[in-house]
Image (cartoon, rainbow, N blue to C red):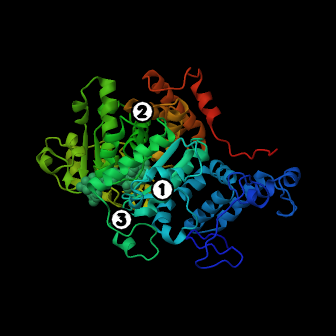
Amino acid sequence: MGNNGDGDVDNNGGVHGSQLVTPWNMSISSGHNLLRDPRHNKGLAFTERERGVHYLTGLLPPIISSQELQEKKVMHILRQYEVPLQRYIAMIDLQERNERLFYKLLIDHVEELLPIVYTPTVGEACQKFGSIFRRPQGLYISLKDKGRVLDVLRNWPERNIEVIVVTDGERILGLGDLGCQGMGIPVGKLSLYTALGGVRPSACLPITIDVGTNNEKLLNDEFYIGLKQNRARGEEYDDLLEEFMNAVKLNYGEKILIQFEDFANHNAFSLLNRYRTTHLVFNDDIQGTASVVLSGLLSALKLLGGTLSDHTFLFLGAGEAGTGIAELIALQISKKTGASIEDARKKIWLVDSKGLVVSSRKESLQHFKLPWAHEHEPINNLLEAVKEIKPSVLIGTSGVGKQFTQEVIEAMSSINEKPLIMALSNPTSQAECTAEEAYTWSKGRAIFASGSPFDPVTYEDKVFVPGQANNAYIFPGFGLGLIMCGATRVHDDLLLAASEGLASQITDEDYAKGIIFPPFSCIRKISAHIAASVADKAYELGLASLLPRPNDLVKFAESCMYSPIYPTYR
Ligand SMILES: NC(=O)C1=CN([C@@H]2O[C@H](COP(=O)(O)OP(=O)(O)OC[C@H]3O[C@@H](n4cnc5c(N)ncnc54)[C@H](OP(=O)(O)O)[C@@H]3O)[C@@H](O)[C@H]2O)C=CC1
Ligand SMILES: CC(=O)C(=O)O
Ligand SMILES: [Mg+2]
C-alpha cells in the first residue's frame, strides 16, 4: 500500500508515527514509475523495444497487446458490472492508470459510456463521493486557503492549462448542495472536454471551491471530505472568489477559459456578470444549456414548421437553465425578426415554485426573473398555466422529477398536433417526465428530448428515439472554438453561432426519425463544426487573437484535437 490519500505514508520500510520523512520521486518516467504514470503508461502495449529501453523488462508479463485488444478487454470487464456506479469506479481507475486507453474507450463507445462518466451516474458518484474517494482528481481550494490561492494553484503539476471547470458544489445537477463532493462534476465535464471536444487532458484543470455546505447529512457524515461548516456568504464568499479569479489570470494568463458549473443561482448570475468583461468566462448551466436548447428548437422547426417567433414557450423552472434558455431564444427571435428584445420575450413564459412569473409578483422576484414578469393573472400550477398560455413548447428546468404529469402532457397534446416536450432536469430521477410517459401520454405525437438519456420507446409498434438535450453537445466544441482562436471574451453571438453549428449537423435521416439532436457517436465531428462556427464569429467580432485566421476552420479544429492513440517512445 502507498499513500492512501489521507496522508498516512506506510511504505517507508518501517518508518512510522512522528518520524519525519521526505516524499521524493524520480523526475523522468521510466521503469516502474512509467507504469505508474497514467499519462504515459501503455500497460501491455509497450513494445519489446520500449520495454528494453525504458527498463520495463520483467515488470510486465511477456505478452504484448495492441491498444485495440486492451480496449476490447476493458469493455468486456466493464460490461460485466451490472451496477452503473461500479462501472464509474472502474472508469476512474482506468483514467488514473492509463489515460489514453480511458479516452480511447470513451471516444469509441461514447453513447454507452457517457451515462457512466456523466449524467446520470456522475450524480450518484457525487452523492457517494466520500466513500468512493480514492485519489484526488482535481484541485481543492477552500476558505482555509484565503490569502494563498495563487500558491495552491501552483501546486497543480501542469503549467499549460487552457480550461478550468470550477464549481462550489451548491447545485449539483438537480441533487442540491453536495459541498466538496461536487468535484465529480468538474472532473466529468473535463473528461468530456477531451473526449468530445479534443482538448488535451493535460490542459484541463478541475477545481472545487469549498466554502462549506448547508447539507446537514454531509455535515453529520464522519466520512465527509469537505469543510464541516455552513456555507460562507456575502463578503467572505465574494472575497475568496475574487482572489481565485485574479490568481487564475495571474497564473495562466488572459486566455484561460473558466467554465462555471453547478453554482446555485444566487451566485451564478452575479459571478457571470462580474467577470464576463474581465475574464474569458462561460456559465455552462446558463449559457451552454441555452445554446443546446436553441439548437434543438431550430432543428425542431423542420418538423413543426413555422419560425421561432411563431411559437409560444412555457418553462417549468425559472432559474439558471430556464432564464438562460429563455433569454437566448428571445435574442434569436429579436435578431431574426428585428423585434425588440422586450417584444421577443413576450412569447416566453416561466413558472417557478410559486407559480407563473407575472408582473404582480415583481416586488418579490429575483432580478433574473424580472424580464419575464409579464402582465397576467396569477396562476399557481403548471396544468392551469398550460391551459391558459397554450404553449407549443414545454421545457422543464425545475430540478424536480415527475412534474410533467399525464394531465400536463395531455393538455399539451390537445393544444398541439406535435407538442415539443423537453424534460431537461438531471439526473434521470429528476427528469420532469420519462420518454415513455411523453410518447405514451401524447399518443406518439410528442417530439421529446431530455437532459439525461432515455432508451428508445416502442409505442403502438413504432419506435421513438428520444433526443438528449444536454449542454454536453455544446461546451466541448464551444470551448475548443474559443481556445483555438485565442478568444479573449465570450459574447452572446458566439452562443448563437454554436447553436447553429450544432443544428447544421443534423441529417435528413435524423429528421426522418424525428430526431432533433444528432447522435453522440458523431460528436467529435460535431464539435469541430461547433468550434469552427464559434471561432468564425469570434474573428468577425474581433475577439480572436490567433492571427492570421486559418482558412479552413473545421480542418483547423480537427487538427487541434487530442488523439488517444499511443505514441511510440524513443
Ligand atoms: N440538460 C441540461 O443540459 C441541463 C440541465 N440542467 C438541470 O436543470 C435543473 C435546474 O437547474 P438550474 O436552472 O441551474 O436550477 P435553479 O435552482 O437555478 O432553478 C430551478 C428553478 O426551478 C424552480 N422550481 C423548483 N421546484 C419547483 C416546482 N416544484 N415547481 C416549479 N418550479 C420549481 C425554482 O423555483 P424558485 O425560483 O421559486 O425557487 C427555480 O426557478 C437541474 O436539474 C439541472 O440538472 C441544468 C443545466 C443544464
Ligand atoms: C448538464 C448540467 O450541466 C446540469 O445538469 O447541471
Ligand atoms: Mg451543470
The amino acid type of the residue labelled 3 equals Thr
Q: Quadrant of ligand 1?
A: bottom left
Locate residue 135, reporting x and y percent: 58, 64
How would you rate the neighbour count of disc 1 (Cα within 10 Å): few for under 14, some for 14-19, many for 20 or more?
many
How would you rate the neighbour count of disc 2 (Cα within 10 Å): few for under 14, some for 14-19, many for 20 or more?
many
Q: Is mark 1 within 8 Å of ligand 3?
A: yes
Per the model, the C-alpha gap separating discs 1 and 2 is 24 Å
Mark nearer the viewer, 1 or 3: 3
- The residue located at (58%, 22%) in the rendering is 550
Query: Which residue is labeled 2 in the image?
Result: 489
Q: Are marks 1 and 2 in contact (CB under 8 Å)?
A: no
Query: Which residue is labeled 1 in the image?
Result: 185
Q: Earlier in the sequence, mark 1 or mark 3?
A: 1
- The reply, left or right, for residue 455 in relation to residue 570 is left
Locate residue 518, reporting x and y percent: 53, 40
- The residue located at (55%, 32%) in the rendering is 484
Q: Is mark 2 within 8 Å of ligand 3?
A: no
- Quarter of the image for residue 342 reads top left
Locate residue 254, reporting x and y percent: 46, 35
